[in-house]
Amino acid sequence: MTLANGLFAQVLDYLYKEGLVADQQELSAKTGITETTISRILNDRVRQPSKETWLKLNAAFGNIFNPQYFRGESIVMLVADLEHEHVDMAAEDEPKPFIPSWADAFFDIMTQQVKQNEALNRELRQSITEVKEIKDQLIAIINNIKR
């Protein structure tokens, strides 16, 4: 899938996930983009969605999408993610970093992965301890046999 078509698919996934559209037919009805055009874009039969297609898509949903995202110039899809609250520099030593909405989900996934790794490390340390104990027992048995 080309970059523009990949972005189009990501935008569609977002619209489906948020319940803003149920299918390509509803997307077509809301945007004025024909179902054929939508299908052609998603199946890579259109090299790149036209600027008009992006404008129709964005306008149909209250301009919630960042136009720079459509052009591949930004990783921030939603305009709302660009509009983070102003931080009063006098009130705080350091401004809070801007974190896009998708970062929370990514952070949760990484946190779960770290917890799983910690659990595996504990099990591995326990196994190593058990193997050392067995080794010590075998050495004691061998020493008894030699006597």
Image (cartoon, grey):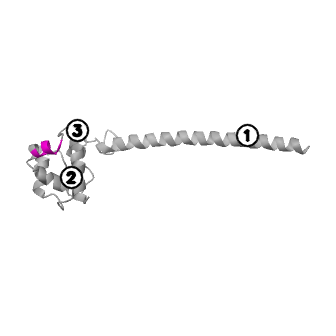
Q: Magenta segment range?
A: 23-28
Tag 3 secondary structure = loop
* Residue 136 at x, y percent in the picture: 77, 42
11 left or right, relative to 133: left
- The quadrant of the picture occupied by the C terminus is top right
| Element carrying mark 1 | helix
Q: Position of residue 87 (x, y in %)?
A: 28, 41
Q: CA distance from mark 3 to mark 1?
A: 55 Å
Quick check: 41 above or below 16?
below
For the N terminus, the quadrant is bottom left
| Mark before the other along the chain sequence, 3 or 1 | 3
Q: Is residue 70 above or below residue 85?
A: below
Residue indicated by mark 1: 133
The amino acid sitting under disc 1 is Glu
Q: The residue under label 3 is which amino acid type?
A: Glu
Residue 131 x/y as whole percent: 69, 42
Residue 80 vs residue 1, the one in the foreground: 1
Taking the image as shown, residue 92 lies to the left or right of residue 56, namely right
Distance CA(mark 2)–CA(mark 3): 15 Å
Q: Residues within 10 Å of mark 1 (few under 14, many from 20)?
A: few
Q: Is residue 34 visible?
A: yes
On screen, residue 47 above or below 138:
below
Residue 112: name its quadrant. Answer: top left
Label drawn at residue 8: 2
For the point 25% across and 59% down, the residue is 3
Viewer-proximal residue, 14 or 59?
14
Task: Tell me, for residue 18, which label it has, or none.
Answer: 3
Q: Is residue 91 left or right of residue 33?
A: right
**Residue 37 occupies quadrant:** bottom left
147 or 98: which is nearer to us?
147
What amino acid type should be assigned to the residue bearing mark 2? Phe
User: Which residue is depicted at the point 84% across and 44% down?
Assistant: 142
